[in-house]
Structure formats: C-alpha cells, structure tokens
Image (tube, rainbow, N blue to C red):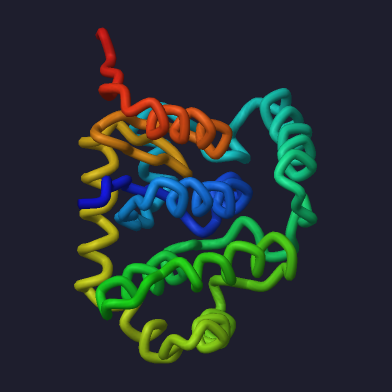
C-alpha cells in the first residue's frame, strides 16, 4: 500500500506554485498517494498567529520579494513577482479543485495549469469563465466544476480542510503532512524527501 501525504495549499499561494513541480517529483519517486486539501489561508493565519501580507511589517514584505526572486531562480521558473490579478479571493478556484476531487478526477493536471496561470500568465482565477476554460484545457468539465464550486457541499469540504489543518498543526501553504509530521513551505520538500528515503519514524514536537 502506498504511503500517504496530506497536501495543504491554496491556489493564491506563490510558494505552493513554486514548489509544486518538485513536490510531484517526490510523489512519483516514492509512489505517494496525495490527499489534496485546499484550505483558506486568511483563516489559518488569523487562528495560528500569522498575518496577511499587507499587514506584515515592511521589512518582512521586502524580504519576501527577495525570497521570491531567489526561489524563482532556484526552481528554474519564470514568473511575475506582482501579477496583475494577485492577490485574489481563492474561494472559487480552491473550490473547483475540491469539486474535481469530489467528481473522481485527479486534480494534479488542473493544478499544473492553474498555478502558472496566476504567476506566469497573469490570469484572474476569481473569474468563473477563466477557471472554466482552464479546467476545459485539462479535459475536465469546466462549467460544471465552477458551478459546483459554489455549493454548500463544497463550502463544507473547504471548512473541513481548515479544521483538518488546525488539527494537524498546519498554519500555512504549502504544507505536506507525512505520518503526522508537518513539513511547512516549499523549501522543506527536500526534507520531506529525506524522511521518505531514510524511512525514519516521524518527528514529534517536544512541547
């Protein structure tokens, strides 16, 4: 039976986008089963002591811009540091991913398309027509998924992901949870791979 990893993310997270290709390489290498869990970031931040970007001290905001450039180079990507349609309300887009999972589709082809849609193509993922077209490009029923995204059932699943994140000690995007051990941030993917390669027992907090 393949090992499982819970993948918490939001489509508005640049770090989830930056790390996604490498994460999928780790998934393939170690034959992982991924539980995709889109989650609302604003609530996670507020409940775990974090701050939305615009409320952070300017020193932290400036450092973030430097880090984006470093990791853009490190991961071999080309993207806009300040895309036209970012930040955006990710509820609809994250809900489309949940709706795709609910319908039995592998969401990864969609994620591989919509992440760069924001950061490279500067598309508006809060626009239902844009989301439908991107899903169609992946062979998914775009209009149906967009319509389903707004349903009470998808809202409930989105909320459950938030609750699951808090229970798992997840506080940001992306986070990868392996056997209860949280790896927060795309810069921890190599550490996730190390844990899988070594087969070690999961680390636990001592507090």
How many dots with numbers? Answer: 0
- Tell me the residue at 37%/72% (across/down): 106
- 95 vs 130: above or below: above
- Residue lying furthest top: 206
**Is the C terminus in the top left, top right, bottom left or bottom right quadrant?**
top left
Q: Residue 22 in the image: x percent, y percent?
A: 57, 48
- In the picture provided, is 169 more to the left or to the right than 81? left
Residue in the foreground of this view, choosing between 184 and 139? 139
- In the picture provided, is 81 more to the left or to the right than 44? right
- Tell me the residue at 53%/80% (across/down): 131
- In the picture provided, is 207 more to the left or to the right than 68? left
Choose top left, top right, bottom left or bottom right for residue 55.
Answer: top right
Q: Residue 108 in the image: x percent, y percent?
A: 46, 66
Q: Residue 157 in the image: x percent, y percent?
A: 23, 62
Residue in the foreground of this view, choosing between 150 and 14? 14
- 168 vs 112: above or below: above
Choose top left, top right, bottom left or bottom right for residue 183.
Answer: top left
Q: Residue 132 in the image: x percent, y percent?
A: 50, 86
- 25 vs 138: above or below: above
- Tell me the residue at 56%/81% (across/down): 134
- Tell me the residue at 42%/65% (across/down): 94
């Amino acid at each position: 039976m393949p090992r499982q990893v819970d993948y918490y993310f939001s489509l508005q997270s640049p770090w989830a986008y930056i790390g996604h290709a490498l994460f999928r390489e780790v998934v393939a290498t170690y034959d992982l089963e991924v539980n995709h869990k889109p989650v609302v970031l604003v609530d996670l931040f507020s409940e775990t002591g974090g701050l939305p970007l615009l409320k952070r001290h300017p020193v932290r905001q400036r450092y973030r811009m430097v880090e984006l450039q470093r990791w853009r180079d490190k991961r071999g990507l080309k993207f806009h540091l300040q895309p036209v349609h970012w930040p955006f309300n990710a509820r609809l887009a994250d809900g489309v991913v949940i709706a795709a999972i609910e319908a039995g589709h592998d969401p990864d082809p969609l994620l591989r398309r919509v992440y760069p849609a924001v950061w490279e193509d500067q598309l508006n993922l809060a626009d239902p027509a844009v989301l439908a077209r991107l899903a169609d490009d992946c062979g998914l029923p775009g209009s149906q998924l967009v319509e389903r995204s707004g349903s009470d059932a998808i809202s409930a699943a989105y909320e459950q992901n938030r609750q699951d994140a808090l229970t798992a000690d997840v506080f940001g995007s992306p986070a990868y949870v392996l056997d209860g051990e949280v790896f927060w941030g795309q810069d921890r993917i190599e550490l996730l791979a190390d844990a899988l390669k070594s087969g070690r027992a999961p680390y636990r907090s001592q507090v």
